[in-house]
């Protein structure tokens, strides 16, 4: 099968220096910090490549903890691992300028969600959390059925049970 | 660099990691998250379409 795009873990052979998403923070992280995070296992970076092996986009996944405020006892009993629930952080997601406008951000997001869900057979996670960098990013996640948190408006969340339903539907 | 500068940089780096990996939620946000975990939703039309497209592009459709 010769697919136009594929996603794989970031490796030494990938040329990340020329990557340009147009967002300084995302580019700087990818050029200078991602390798260190990967070596220390602080984040797992994945890249989308085209047929010429050029990097189309990237995202990173890490474990994170959702520290809940106090809850009534009746609800706490239903919650595993209260007060800190294990979750997955979609730390960064970027598409190269030359590939923007082709809905590839959505494909990359779906890959991150699918991978996060599959990972729960090995390590537990109640959902995927993301910090949107700007209004455009926030709208993107809301459009893809993430829920917004009222007191931290740039933080969005989607439960793993929701994600499982989405990927189990045919 | 002096020890002070190094130490400050280290503390700042540490804080960045903690800020992102432990999300301290307000009472209201905790409720929103707990409700989402305990009451999963069916995917809406956008997600259904997105999953179909994703499978097609990635060649994940079973025969």
Image (tube, coloured by chain):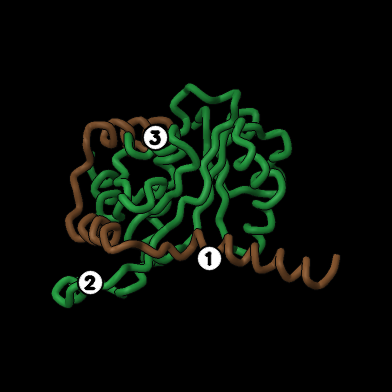
Chain colours: A green, B brown
Residue with the mark numbered 1: B18
Looking at the picture, does residue A52 appear above or below residue A62? above
Task: Give me the C-alpha separation between circle 2 and circle 3.
Answer: 31 Å
Q: Residue at x 27, y 63 (%)?
A: B27
- Mark 1 neighbour density, 10 Å: few (under 14) some (14–19) many (20 or more): few
Q: Quadrant of the C terminus of chain A?
A: top left
Which SS class for mark 1?
helix
Label drawn at residue A71: 2
Write down the quadrant of residue B32 in the picture: bottom left
Could you say which is closer to the camera, residue A23 or residue A69? A69
The chain letter for the residue carrying disc 3 is A
Write down the quadrant of residue A159 in the picture: bottom left
Please, which residue is most extreme toward the right here? B1
Label drawn at residue A117: none
Q: Position of residue A133 (x, y in %)?
A: 50, 42
- Mark 2 neighbour density, 10 Å: few (under 14) some (14–19) many (20 or more): some
Whether residue B53 can be seen here: yes
């Amino acid at each position: 099968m010769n697919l136009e795009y594929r996603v794989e873990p970031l490796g030494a052979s990938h040329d990340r220096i020329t990557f340009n998403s147009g967002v300084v923070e995302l580019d700087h992280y990818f050029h200078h910090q991602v390798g260190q995070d990967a070596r220390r296992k602080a984040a797992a970076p994945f890249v989308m490549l085209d047929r010429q092996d050029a990097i189309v986009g990237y995202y990173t996944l890490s474990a994170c903890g959702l520290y809940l405020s106090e809850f009534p006892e009746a609800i706490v009993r239903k919650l595993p691992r209260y007060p800190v629930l294990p979750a997955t952080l979609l730390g960064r997601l970027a598409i190269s300028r030359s590939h923007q406008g082709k809905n590839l951000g959505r494909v990359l997001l779906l890959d991150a969600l699918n991978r996060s869900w599959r990972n729960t057979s090995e390590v537990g996670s109640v959902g995927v959390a993301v910090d949107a960098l700007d209004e455009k990013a926030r709208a993107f996640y809301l459009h893809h059925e993430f829920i917004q948190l009222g007191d931290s408006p740039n933080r969005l969340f989607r439960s793993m049970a929701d994600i499982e339903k989405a990927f189990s539907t045919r | 660099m002096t020890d002070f500068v190094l130490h400050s940089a280290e503390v700042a780096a540490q804080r960045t990691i903690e800020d992102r990996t432990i999300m301290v939620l307000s009472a209201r946000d905790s409720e929103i998250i707990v409700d989402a975990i305990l009451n999963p939703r069916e995917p809406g039309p956008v997600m259904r379409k997105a999953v179909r497209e994703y499978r097609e592009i990635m060649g994940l459709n079973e025969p």
